[in-house]
Image (tube, rainbow, N blue to C red):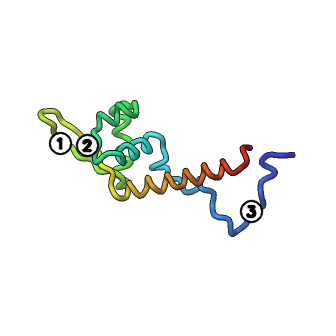
Amino acid sequence: MSGALDSPEPDETDSPHPVTGLDERVHQRVRLGILTIAHEARRVEFGYLRTQLELTAGNLSQHLAVLETAGLVEIEKGYAGRRGRTWITLTAAGSAALAEEIARLKLLIARVETAGGQ
């Protein structure tokens, strides 16, 4: 018989599965998108994020609040001409969290790819 019952014996020297290190604040699809887009630019405008991620303003605001509370982004409100604007900037902690998330995802992908295509 094959499948889940054929899993290797646990070994205390084994490191934890890469999925255990994924950060829910970062890993959530929309927040990962926000952090990735913010990483690509010095700062990104709220409307651009809303359009790129196909979100409502309210939904985007909620995700930004989670990231701002976690210290992963900074939000700056101001004006461009007479129009109010909101800009989002990735913090150093946000950059580190994104890098860690990407590293964990790479480990997870490598694990799947070396499993022999099962």
| Discs 1, 2 touching: Cβ within 8 Å | yes
Give the left or right position of residue 52, taking residue 19 as reference.
left
Figure disc tally:
3
The residue indicated by pointer 3 is: 10
- The kind of residue on which mark 3 rests is Pro
Residue sitting at 18 percent across and 36 percent down? 84
Question: Viewer-proximal residue, 66 or 23?
Answer: 23
The answer to whether one can see residue 65 in this image is no
**Local crowd at mark 2 within 10 Å, few (<14), some, or many (≥20)?**
some
Q: Is residue 97 above or below residue 81?
A: below
Q: CA distance from mark 1 to mark 2?
A: 8 Å
Q: CA distance from mark 2 to mark 3?
A: 48 Å
Residue 76, image x, y percentages? 23, 46
Disc 3 element: loop
The answer to whether one can see residue 103 in this image is yes
Disc 2 element: strand
Residue sitting at 34 percent across and 58 percent down? 92
Residue 43, image x, y percentages? 28, 46
Mark 1 / mark 2, whichever is N-terminal? 1
| Numbered mark located on residue 78 in the image | 1
